[in-house]
Amino acid sequence: MGFVAHTDAIIFDLRQNGGGQPAMVTLIASYLFDKPTHLIDIYNRKEDSTTQNWTLSYLPGPRLTRQPVFVLTSKRTFSGADEFAFDLKN
């Protein structure tokens, strides 16, 4: 993510995005918070267990907390992409 470290703003275009893996959502979101932040709880009905997802403490690049962040969504934004937008909004 270092390639966007010196930009004026970051825009995530998630329109028409069908989703992704929760681990990738956590990784990318971690760059946008400067301190440990609770992102989401995921409930596994089959195992009757809840997993908390928090931002990562170590990242292989600089955190991107100085730029404004914009997230574009649509009615076709689903799954991990929807979670990413939710994480940043909340």
Image: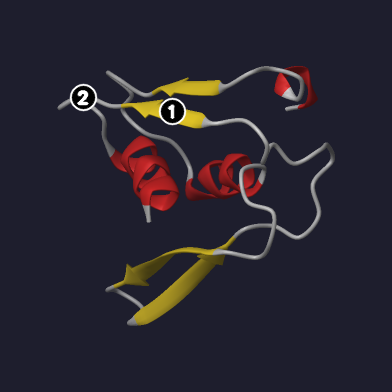
Q: Please identify the residue farthest to the left as the structure is shown.
A: 75
Circle 2: residue type: Ser
Circle 1: residue type: Phe
Residue 70 at x, y = what percent?
Answer: 43, 28
Question: Nearest the camera: 89 or 21?
Answer: 89
Q: Is residue 5 left or right of residue 53?
A: right
Could you tell me which secondary element the residue under label 1 belongs to? strand
> Which quadrant holds the N terminus?
top right
Q: Residue at x 49, y 71 (%)?
A: 52
Question: Nearest the camera: 69 or 15?
Answer: 69
Residue 80 at x, y = what percent?
Answer: 39, 41
Q: Is residue 89 left or right of residue 36?
A: left
Disc 1 packing (10 Å; few <14; some 14–19; many ≥20): few
Residue 40 at x, y = what percent?
Answer: 42, 63
Question: Nearest the camera: 69 or 38?
Answer: 69
- The residue wearing badge 2 is 74
Q: Is residue 9 left or right of residue 44?
A: right
Q: Is residue 25 left or right of residue 8?
A: left
- The residue wearing badge 1 is 70
Q: Is residue 68 above or below residue 45?
A: above
